[in-house]
Image (cartoon, rainbow, N blue to C red):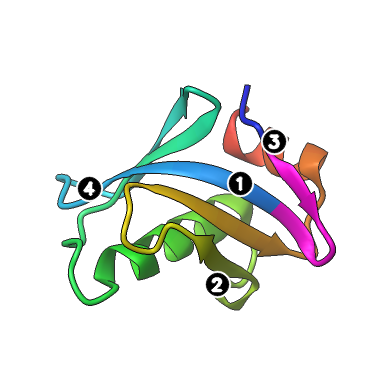
Amino acid sequence: MINMELHPEGVVIPVRVSAAASRDRVLGEHAGALKLSVSAAPEKGKANKAVCALVAKTLGVASSRVSIVAGETSRDKKVLVRGADVETVRKALLP
């Protein structure tokens, strides 16, 4: 199960990212985090932007509501989804 945290602005999702993959996709859960692969390279914030875009697309929210709040230079990140609740996010990410 993904260990999401409540935040005053929404929900924080722990994410494990594989950058420079063949395509952008949600791979499931790994060690309490959401596992994602993105095709963008991990340079100059490209992979971070791709992570935010993938999470936003998967949840059906505007990409402006999704941001990385920890781990910008790491494979393990924390992504904030503003205006979301834990149950809605859980259902959308892992149906």
- Tell me the residue that label 2 is attached to: 63
- Tell me the residue that label 3 is attached to: 90
Per the rendered image, the range of residues in magenta is 4-11
* Disc on the earlier residue, 3 or 1: 1
What residue do we see at 44% from left, 56% from top? Answer: 54
x and y percentages locating residue 28 in the rendered image:
46, 28
What secondary structure do most residues of the magenta stretch adopt? strand
> Which of the 4 image quadrants contains residue 53?
bottom left
Q: In the drawing, does residue 5 fall left or right of residue 70?
A: right
Amino acid type, residue under disc 2 in the picture: Ser
* Disc on the earlier residue, 3 or 2: 2
Q: Nearer the viewer, residue 24 or 42?
A: 42
Q: Nearer the viewer, residue 55 or 10?
A: 10
x and y percentages locating residue 36 in the rendered image:
38, 41
Query: Which mark, by number, is residue 72?
Result: none
* Disc on the earlier residue, 1 or 4: 1
Position above or below: 24 against 29: below
Amino acid type, residue under disc 1 in the picture: Ile
* Cα distance in 3D space between marks 2 and 1: 15 Å
- Tell me the residue that label 1 is attached to: 13
* Cα distance in 3D space between marks 3 and 2: 18 Å
* Disc on the earlier residue, 4 or 2: 4
Identify the element where label 2 is drawn: helix
Identify the element where label 3 is drawn: helix
Mark 3 crowdedness (10 Å alpha carbons): few <14, some 14-19, many ≥20? some
Q: Nearer the viewer, mark 2 or mark 1?
A: 1
